[in-house]
Image (spheres, rainbow, N blue to C red):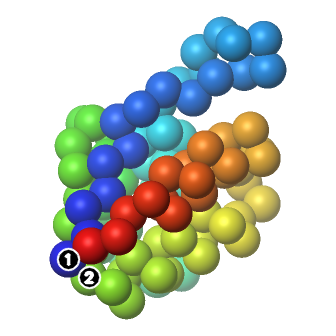
Amino acid sequence: MKKVNLNFDLFNLDGSKISTAGKMVSGLLMSEMKGDAEKLFDWAMTFNRGEEVSMDNSDFTKFKELIKSTERLSVLVKAPIIKYLETIKK
């Protein structure tokens, strides 16, 4: 299982805080039209509370691909999250 903790700040180009990664991803997950609705809902609620989500390898791969491919998050938001996800080994 991989532990995903998106409780970190995201910043604008001028260094001002935009939000947390968890809050931004929660909004994305809640707006999804495809996938396991219950799982996406539970993840969104957990990330929104600033808590960690455990994912098996299959779910982690799907989650990472969703972040990479979505057009509903800007590069300013996606890049730090993708960089963080790349650090998760186990």
How would you rate the neighbour count of disc 1 (Cα within 10 Å): few for under 14, some for 14-19, many for 20 or more?
A: few
Position of residue 36 in the picture relative to residue 80 (left or right): left
The amino acid sitting under disc 2 is Asp
Contact between marks 1 and 2 (CB within 8 A): the answer is yes
Distance, label 1 to label 2, CA atoms, is: 5 Å
Image spot of residue 18 (x, y percent) = 61, 21
Q: Residue at x 33, y 85 (%)?
A: 57
Q: Residue at x 35, y 53 (%)?
A: 44
Q: Is residue 29 visible?
A: no
Task: Identify which residue, 31 or 25, lies in the foreground.
Answer: 25
- Of labels 1 and 2, earlier in sequence is 1
Task: Identify which residue, 85 or 74, lies in the foreground.
Answer: 85
Q: Is residue 5 above or below residue 87?
A: above
Locate the C terminus by quadrant.
bottom left
Task: Identify which residue, 43 or 9, lies in the foreground.
Answer: 9
Q: Is residue 51 visible?
A: yes
Residue indicated by mark 1: 1
Q: Is residue 41 above or below residue 61?
A: above
